[in-house]
Image (tube, rainbow, N blue to C red):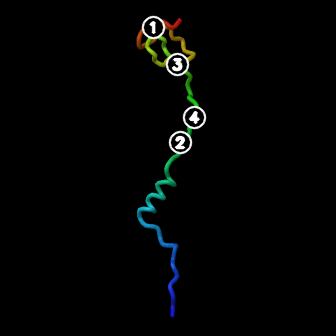
Amino acid sequence: MHTEENNTDKPPSLLSGILGNALKSTQRYKQEAPALETKKCPGCGAARPEGTDLRFCDFCGHQFY
């Protein structure tokens, strides 16, 4: 008489295959430091590039220097 063993190595279902592939191929993002230093305009709060020769804010006209 032949007895069948409980087979726990069943082929994955279609949904678990799709989800497994999605998890493996999902990009992981990491926190990075900003590439450009900025300073805020005291008049309107707009970000202005640090180290540029700006005398007036392009948005509100506030004088920087």
Kindly state the secondary structure of the residue where label 2 is placed.
loop
For the residue carrying disc 2, how many other residues have a C-alpha within 10 Å: few (<14), some (14-19), or many (20+)?
A: few
For the residue carrying disc 4, how many other residues have a C-alpha within 10 Å: few (<14), some (14-19), or many (20+)?
A: few
In the drawing, what numbered circle is on residue 29? Answer: 2
Kindly state the secondary structure of the residue where label 3 is placed.
strand
Farthest bottom residue in view = 1
Rendered position, 22 above or below 10: above
- Residue that carries the numbered disc 3 in the rendered image: 49
Distance CA(mark 4)–CA(mark 3): 19 Å
Q: Along the polypeptide, which appears first: circle 2 or circle 3?
A: 2
Q: Position of residue 33 (x, y in %)?
A: 58, 31
Kindly state the secondary structure of the residue where label 1 is placed.
loop
> In the picture, residue 59 is in which quadrant?
top left
In the rendered structure, which amino acid carries the disc numbered 2? Tyr
In the rendered structure, which amino acid carries the disc numbered 3? Pro
Number of numbered discs visible in the structure rendering? 4
